[in-house]
Image: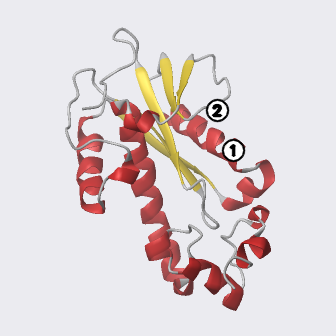
Amino acid sequence: MLKQYYTRDLIEAGCDEAGRGCLAGPVFAAAVILPKDYENELLDDSKKISLKNRLLLRENILKNSIVWAVAMVDNEEIDEINILNASILAMQKAVLKLNTTPQLLLIDGNRFKPFRNIPFETIVKGDGKYMSIAAASILAKTFRDDYMLELHLKHPQYDWDRNKGYPTKEHKAAIAQFGITPYHRKSFRLNEQLKLVF
């Protein structure tokens, strides 16, 4: 089972993002403060969990967390500030939406920027180590997936209901055939991506 906390005495918020490697759509991030005694044997890195269990976990996290928040940065801002800065900004926006101020941020990955004088720890593969980060990964992933399903209804030819904007062969082929949408990330060198299709 994952670790329940990094420090026993501080209010910790786990933070993670979803959608960093996509060709289309926003990057989402979540911040979650869990009770120190929170337990859930299903909880793990969202990428290792089935859709059914991700949705079960989301319901449980929303019900049992002390506080949670989800935020996004859209594709246009990603193009302006780059995906790393957009991922960090999305996490900062999620933390800002919390109605309890954390005393420590647990950040999945190895990059973050000082924010509101809140101490932070970057933890590589933290979503497979700490419950609060794993919980954030579940919320970021499922909320973003729901958003991409809505976009799919506007642009069904790109299969966003299945690939969620990631660079699958089918997604690249659709870009080659139909061009890009207002939701595609122009800074991701889409023309170079297409060379991998043919």
Residue 141 x, y percent position in the rendering:
43, 53
Q: Quadrant of the C terminus?
A: bottom right
> In this rendering, does residue 189 appear at all?
yes
How packed is label 2: few (under 14 Cα within 10 Å), some, or many (20 or more)?
some
- Dividing the image into 4 quarters, which one contains the N terminus? top left
Question: In screen coordinates, is 151 left or right of 195?
Answer: left
Q: Which residue occupies 24% across, 55% down?
A: 53
Q: Position of residue 80 (x, y in %)?
A: 80, 53
Q: Is residue 53 left or right of residue 131?
A: left
Distance between the alpha carbons at the discs numbered 2 and 1: 8 Å
* Residue 99 visible in the current orientation: no
Q: Which residue is mark 1?
A: 84
Q: Where residue 184 sits: x, y (%)?
A: 68, 70
In the displayed structure image, the side of residue 146 where residue 73 appears, left or right: right
Query: Considering only vertical position in the picture, is 141 above or below 29?
Result: below
Secondary structure under badge 2? loop
Which kind of residue does numbered mark 1 sit on? Leu
Please say if 37 is above or below 95. above
Q: Residue furthest bottom?
A: 177
- Res 150 label: none
| Residue type marked 2 | Arg
Residue contact at pointers 2 and 1, CB within 8 angstroms? yes
Q: Nearer the viewer, residue 75 or 191?
A: 191
- Which residue position holds label 2? 111
Residue placed at 60% from the left, 53% from the top? 20
Relative side of 169 to 64, left or right: right
Q: Quadrant of residue 174?
A: bottom right
The vertical placement of 170 against 14, above or below, is: below
